[in-house]
Structure formats: structure tokens, C-alpha cells
Image (tube, rainbow, N blue to C red):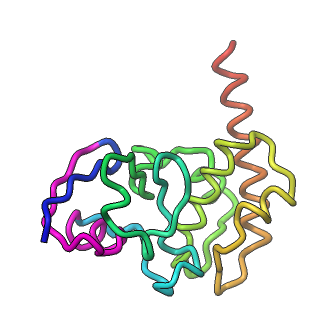
Amino acid sequence: MAAIKLSINGKSYEIDVEEDMPLLWAIRDYVGMTGTKFGCGIAQCGACTVHLNGTPIRSCSTPVTVAVGKKITTIEGVSEANNHPIQQAWVELQVPQCGYCQSGQIMSAVALLEETAQPTDEDIDAAMQGNICRCGTYDRIRKAIHRAAEIKSDNKTLSKK
């Protein structure tokens, strides 16, 4: 066991864990943030997606030591008031069905909008590839990402006035 220091959602945590422990379990079991979900355990479904220095990664297959000295953002850290444009669009368009995959979907969508302000369907498909929705809400997810881009653009326009 080693004392591992992590920066999650802007706060520092020190936990005693095995160095090869997946980041997912450190976040969920040791830090107590349960929004990031366990899905497949082999980095194929995307339910465990978090950001590491702004890049979406699969936390179920990333050793906790890889995250030391880096900025981790979980679903809990997307926005304090749950008012990120992606979150607003998800609610407005009622994207989730069962909801299990949604934290991973949202994390991938947030990263996409950070890189591409007005994504095309092809951009969305590429960015969301690997995020599996067992309920098949892919059309609603795509619509919500387009809507979030509109919201984000409208917010920028309003802030310039």
C-alpha cells in the first residue's frame, strides 16, 4: 500500500491504496464519489469515463498512479449547480432511459464540446464511440449534444452583451 495523492474536482485527497488499483475504485471506494460507474471493467463500455487533464479516459483500466499529479474531473465536478450546457440539454431532451451509462456519456460529451464548439454528427459519433448505451438512446444523445452546443453558443452571445 502506498499513500497516493489525487486532485479530484479541484480538491486534494490522500488515500492509502495499492499502486495498481484502478482509478475507478479509488474514486468510488476511497474518495466516496459514486457518480462514476463500473460497467464492464475492460474499458469497452465507457460507463467509467472521467477526465484526466481534460482528456476522457476509462478509469476502470487506468492505474491510480497514472493520475498522480494530474487533474481528475468526475461527473460530480462537471458543474456545481448541474448547469453545464450538456447537463441542461440532457434534462431538456430527457436523454436517459435507465441512466446507468449517462455519467460516462456526459463526460465524453463535455470533452467533445471543449474541443469542438459546433460538432457535426460525424464528430459526435467519433467522440462518443466506445460509450455504450444498452437502452439505445444514441439519437437523443446526439440531439442533446447539438442542443448543448446551441446553449453554449447562446451563453457566449449573452455574456458579450
Q: Residue placed farthest to the top in the image?
A: 161
Q: Is residue 13 magenta?
A: yes
- The residue at the point 42 percent across, 57 percent down is 74
The location of residue 160, given as percent across then percent down, is 68, 15
- The residue at the point 62 percent across, 45 percent down is 85
- The residue at the point 14 percent across, 65 percent down is 2
The location of residue 28, given as percent across then percent down, is 29, 70
Q: Is residue 28 magenta?
A: yes
The location of residue 150, given as percent across then percent down, is 76, 41
Q: What span is in magenta?
A: 11-31
- How many numbered marks have been drawn onto this rendered protein structure? 0
Q: Is residue 19 left or right of residue 134?
A: left
Question: Which of the 4 image quadrants contains residue 91?
Answer: bottom right
Residue 63, compared with residue 116, is above or below; it is below
Q: Nearer the viewer, residue 129 or 158?
A: 129
The location of residue 56, given as percent across then percent down, is 55, 58
- The residue at the point 21 percent across, 52 percent down is 5
Q: Which of 83 and 42 is in front in this view?
A: 42
**Screen quadrant of the N terminus:** bottom left
Question: Which of the 4 image quadrants contains residue 10?
Answer: top left
**Screen quadrant of the C terminus:** top right
